[in-house]
Image (cartoon, helix red, strand yellow):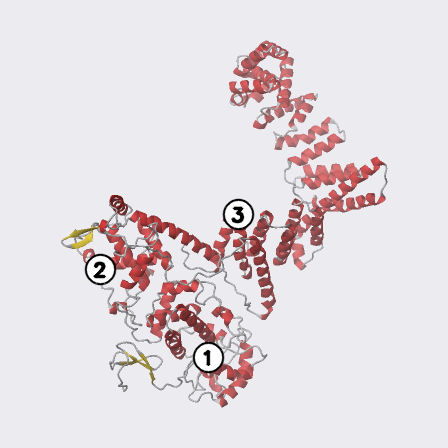
Amino acid sequence: RDFNERCAQCSEVNWGLTDGGRFYCRSCHNVTERSREVVNTDFISNTRVQTISKHLRKQEKTGMCCEWYVCEGFQLILKKQAEALETLGVCPQMKDEILYNFWRHYLQKSKQAYCNRPAGEAVRALSVCDSSTDVDSEPERPSLLHFLSLSESEGDLQTDCSFASSTSKVSGSTSVLSGSVDGSLYLMKNQKEKLRMTMPMTLSFCYMALLWLREPMTLSDLLRFVVEGHIPYLNVFQHFPEKMKLHGLDLKIFFVESWPTYEEVYNKMLELAAYLDLPRFPDITDSCFLHPDMLCMKYLMEANLPDELHNWTCRVVKKICIGEVDFLTLVPGNKSTRKVKYDVLAVAVIVVVLKLLFLLDDHYEWLLSDFAEERNKNNKEGGLYFEFKKWYKVIKCSLDVEQKKLDEERAKYLWRCEKPLFYSAQKKSNVLKRRQMVVNLQNQFGKLSRSVRPAEKPNPSSFQFCWSEENTDGSCFHGHSLKGVLQEKRGLLTAMNTDYWLCTLKLCNEKLCGHLAHYKEVDFPQSYHFVLRLFSFLLRIQPSYIHDEVCVIEHKLFNKNLYKKKPKYNTGRRK
Amino acid sequence: SSSEQHLNFKSSKEACLSYIQDAMLQKQWKRAAEFLTFYVEALEKDYSREYMGPSEIIWRIGTEILCHHSHSSMKEFNSFIEQMKTLGVKRYLKVCLEHAFRLLCNGLVDEAYQILSVAESWRFGEQTAIQDKEMKLIQAYKGLLDYYSWSRQKNILLENERDGFEDLSVEQEMHSCFRKAAVSLKEIIKMPGVWDLFVKCYVDLLEFYGDHNEARQVLNEYAYNSKFPANPNAHVYLYQFLKRHGEPRKSLISALKILHDIVPSHELMIDFNTMLQKSKKRKKRRLGLEVIFAALDYAGWKENVKAWNCLARQVKQIVISGKHLDWIKEEWNSRKDWWPAFHFSRYLAKRNWQENESLSCEKALVAGILLGKDCKYFKYVSHQGCKAQVKRFWILKKFVNKHNPVYLRISG
């Protein structure tokens, strides 16, 4: 607005404002160092923690613990996660700017920090043990939340001192219920307007930041890295500093014993983006990793399918306009558009292409494969034709092995950590005794089991399967040709297959039953199920999610035919 | 393939448990131990509402693995069990008891005794009352081990006597074991149940010290008290006791009556039939016939020469006397449809003749009387026997031929 300099990157004068109050160029998304003066600009996570701790050190009972707030805990967790992501190759901007700006904005929005609260403002349900909820009657006594606000003057000593004397009372009563000061407050249900922070939501934050930066990491990748241990999630709290004691209700907040699902993290992210009133996210263009053309290429490689299929995925993407910037870019709050799950979408496109070319009715694809096999036998030169049967065998073998490994790993997962958790001090000794026994038993039986336990985490990799054309056993299909399934018609390459079966004739109403379609393995051809199984393994999601997406794509693709009176294609289900 | 999406602690541990179970079923102890290592952290969760929680599962599975794994020792097992004892106070005595059993299975009698002694002195508030049954079992098994000690001492004593030694300490030891054993064993057999081993040992003790009355009472209680479950062995023990002490045939017979009702195929049925046959009372002899026919209904008796001999004898006696042919008719009525194929087929005739002449002879007599001289079995066996010029077969042939009309009357 009043900033008229030219952008260093693209020389345009088209400025917008990020959440952090910095100017960014709308054309090329270059973020500058120049920022509008905000109340507190030197925001780095530690500073804030230190600021609060400094004040609280007066209240330290024993030398070993301090009073801490739940949001501080989450902040630490986010910091660790961002650091891990940086180690994985994400740009440092994510940690230093984007994620923290989002976090700070969230704290502001949910009034946990960075806001001005006059001392007299009534706060509902201040403390569990505080019988009088009417704070108005005591103007000298600031509310807990007020304390979290950083007023214009950094740290009002007078306010702090008066608070110092009063918090000891409050904290004395809340510390029985939780190690954190506001643990019990946090869990109270009357916080509907505020989006309460949870452990799964930390991943939503991460993903949101990744998406803003258009980093080459899909949500399924992120979640897989979490489960593989490359990104801290379970038991992160054990890395809290010694002074931050956890017990009681804190456990309900920070201690989780399940992996969050894709849907959960994704939906929360959308909710969060809307809650924070974020503007339209940076555009997803066709040079982005998350664009279906790119992701299709990635998944085709990983699935060991011929590169030539990429032409077809691009054609489908183009035909149903899912490569458009406006379709792909996230606009928070806009409820009318269906939100895009990039990885699921890409994989579904591949499935549709396979159906187009191979039909996948448990009959035709094998027929085509036999023809290709014949041709390959008799004609050694000129490159191999893609044989579905061979591909199926190779993939099934690898998939079964990997699936079995994954299942065993899941059964062997260790959920507890060394840091003891207990709800109350009385249970502490029991908990410690149990822990000791568990360790003893692990040692005893560990000695009796296979001598070497491969304890190393697998190296983080974006690809789970690696197929190389250097393999002489011919197990790589990238370079194989699709000529066997294509024919030339009027100068264009089309599929030999002229039929198609729809996964569903009608899409369900998502709002009513939560799904667009209902997938039951027995209702569909085995080849189709196999393909779904492959991609559901890669993405670590249920086959039905992919199936839903496939249905949507099909309906877009065959829209004209579906709503015509006399459909051109065979729309009935085969077999 | 499990695409268990919402993977959480509970489902992960359930999966782990099923891997353990699979490994155990396939006797892959190393693999089972491996997965158990990952399962044990389930102890840190509260499962108090479940029917069978991790602590019990780990106890039982851990025991199996340690007992079968090639690299595991008793020492390791003991240390493991001691830990298990601290896990669940509600199960404490049960664990102790099973610990003792395992030790006994490995021949560590003294160690087992120690465990039982420690368990016996355990007190834990109201749990002691709740686990009353286990406590009684512990005392009973301790008593059993006392009995074995007593038995050992007794043998030493007898040896010493034979060799002319006298050793007071052995005798004293023996008596003290007796006292301890007697008290415990007496306690347990008061409760309705199946206490075969305990009863036998207790009776043995009583007999040694000459308290026959008490012994007889105990055995009677055990056999006839309706609160106790029906137990064929109870009757066997009573019978054996009475026989040992030269009781009259009458009481012996009454002792075996219920046994016949419960287990018609019991091996003592031969003794039973023999005694009944000798009786002067018609009813008893009738019962004898019933008993021997019933026994031979069972496949396990098909080739029992003694049994066939009993039957043959009785049938012969009846036929010769000419009285009570209706007895045979009654018994044969329910059997004539299936006994021919079951006992008297041509195949069996051949086989019996080849394998066991005496058997074939006895059976042939019965067959000849019940089915007539023209029946397959009799014809074949008698023919073979006469061909081989074995004397008894001539006698057999003559007898059956002579009494053939009987068959007509029976089958009529």
Residue A287 to residue B12: above or below: below
The chain to which mark 3 is attached is B
Amino acid type, residue under disc 1 in the picture: Asn
Identify which residue is drawn at 32% across, 48% down: A390
The mark nearer the N terminus, 2 or 1, is 1
User: Can you identify the residue that label 1 sits on?
Assistant: A46
Q: Residues within 10 Å of mark 1 (few under 14, many from 20)?
A: few
- Left or right, B312 with reference to A410: right
Q: Is there one chain holding both mark 3 and mark 1?
A: no
Using the numbered discs, state the Cα–Cα distance from disc 3 to disc 1 in whole angstroms: 52 Å
The residues tagged by marks 2 and 1 sit, at their Cα atoms, a distance apart of: 50 Å
Q: Position of residue A286 (x, y in %)?
A: 26, 67
Alpha-carbon neighbours of circle 2 within 10 Å: few (<14), some, or many (≥20)?
some
Q: Amino acid at mark 3?
A: Gln
How far across and how far down the image is residue A85, in percent? Answer: 40, 69
Distance between the Cα atoms at labels 3 and 2? 53 Å
The answer to whether residue A86 is left or right of residue A498 is right
Q: Which residue carries the number 3 mark?
A: B28
> Residue B402 sits in which quadrant?
top right
Q: Is residue B232 above or below residue B279?
A: below
Which residue is drawn at the image coordinates 60% and 69% (left, top)?
A: A426
Vertical placement of residue B322 versus A181, above or below: above
Q: Quadrant of residue A15?
A: bottom left
- Chain label for disc 2: A
Drawn side of residue A561 relative to residue B257, left or right: left
Marking on residue A410: none
As helix, strand or loop, the secondary structure at mark 1 comes to helix
Residue neighbourhood size for the residue with mark 3, other residues' Cα within 10 Å, grouped as few (<14), some (14–19), many (≥20): some
Q: Which residue was labeled with disc 2? A: A315
